[in-house]
Image: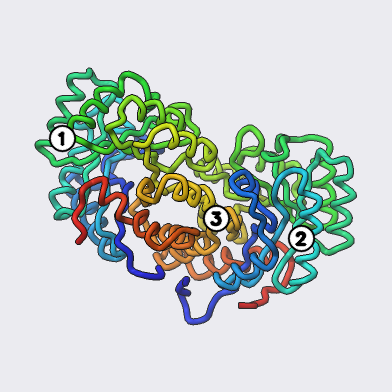
Amino acid sequence: MGRRWFIVDAHQHIEVGSYIYASSLERPELSYEQMIAREAERFEKWFRKYGVSYGAVSNISPMVDRVWRSRHGGNEAVAELINLLNGKVIGQYVPNVFEPPDLIREKIDEAVKKYGFRGIKIHPWVSAFPLNHPIVYPVFDMAAKYKLPVLSHSSRSEFCSPILFADIAMRYPEVPIIMGHMGKQHLHYDVIPAMKLAENIYVETSGSKIQILLERIVKEFGADRVLFGTDGPHDLLPAYVARIEDLDVSEEDKEWILGKSAAKLFNLPKP
Amino acid sequence: MIKWSNAEKPFILDAHTHIGASYLTCYFTEKRWTAEDLIREMNRCGVDMACVSGGGLPHEIKWMNEQTLKAVKRYPNRLIGFVRLNPKFGDVLDDLDYYVRDNGFKGIKLHPNQDGYCLLKEPVLNLIFERAAKYKVPVLIHSGTEPWSVAGQFADQAEMFPDVTFIMAHSGLRNDKHVFESARRVKNLILETSIGGVISPPRILGKDRVVFGSDWPTTSMRSELQEIFDLWNSGRLSDEEALDILGLSMARILRIAPRRAV
């Protein structure tokens, strides 16, 4: 990396429980406690190695499992990480949109008040629901109540194309909605029109590599609507930062993308 | 700048670059990139050589092939010409002969998504692949967009034309398992890393089966290259694997001597 930046990784995952492509026949060799300890060590080392100040973390497991195996379906692991990593982890709660609306609300209440979650993560592709379907409304009601940004996966999947972001964002203008991967590699032409429709749409940079698209977004909407992310943590952080450094935008814009935009959105103190 | 893993900078060959534009840039900007822009970027990133083809809108293809030829003649030690062919053009085989047989281009670039055809058995593609075998040049093909060019179709083509080296640009734009299993079916299918990253290390897929490409100017060449170094620095790639991916494998595929220029 060319210089030392203030970096907030707005898109990270803990690996405890089910994973997207994993077979249910696979059995973990570690106990739950050992997995939490392993993940805490992995995140802590990664933050230190790459000089990243904060990470917004969710667990894949509650997205993958349609029927949860515990009250919070694996979000508990993120709650453990929040406690263990001393303020560096911004917990992203993954609700189960297939549960009754009152139960969804009750659990998000608990996630915020009891466990300290500060954002919502949903994955319409993996969980198989349309991002703008009424079953998601209780989630956005709670996001509005607690001022929680909602990060959603986006891609060419019929469940989370950029136009669905615009639809739900226009219904909930007070909720910041972060378009994870900004349409990935196929729906790049949809991102800017969606952002034009709703000022509360932000984009997160992991998974998209088209430089000219990001430059256009910064020019049209401002760098404070772009959040840096890795979908990690992983060892490609220098490459992901290099991509931002190489953008044809101002140095101040790069500062916003790499850290200040997420810091503003999540009310993070600069360390 | 990129920090090399060892004291000596390795040989780096970018298997996928464009002058003009790429199909991903040309609907966002009217900007066109020149051979000088490409050489400047290669120098900045430490890239010694690059495979280059013309990119842009459909009506620009022939003009961009001419520009690519001029660029290769201007920078013969740095740039390796790939002819961009559209099978729907009536004179596509004449263009293939002109650039490969008569002007020393070392590869063919196809873009099923942009030109609107499926990577399946069809007469004109068959003729192109037969000539690729005859001239012993690889075919670099855009991948990852349904229904035009997905990984399984690459494996089908590679089975039908075992004497042709097929290079899957972007490694299928991820969808890792499908790409990996498709690549495992055949030996003459190479995964190129731009945008898609390294799906599989060569120790699993086989030597000379993964090559670095950036698809510049779509992406940041430096960032795409840094990904290979990140994997190397973190121990996910061995020294031999990293050096092969960075350039030695593509040099062997092209049957050229690796020449450091930066």
Give the spatial CA distance, label 1 vs label 2.
Answer: 58 Å
Residue highlighted by disc 2:
B68
Callout 2 secondary element: helix
Determine whether A104 is above or below A21 in the image: above
Give x and y (percent) for residue A92.
Answer: 24, 40
Choose top left, top right, bottom left or bottom right for residue A67.
Answer: top left
Label 1: how many residues lie within 10 Å, few (<14), some (14-19) or many (20+)?
A: many
Looking at the rendered structure, the kind of residue marked 2 is Thr
Residue highlighted by disc 3:
B219
**Going 76% across and 51% down the picture, which residue do you hit?**
B84
Give x and y (percent) for residue B29.
Answer: 61, 49
Query: Do we see residue B196 in this rendering?
Result: no
Does B236 sit left or right of A6 as displayed?
Answer: right
Give the spatial CA distance, label 2 vs label 3.
Answer: 20 Å
Callout 3 secondary element: loop
Residue highlighted by disc 1:
A111
Which chain letter matches label 1?
A
For the residues tagged 1 and 2, is the chain the same? no
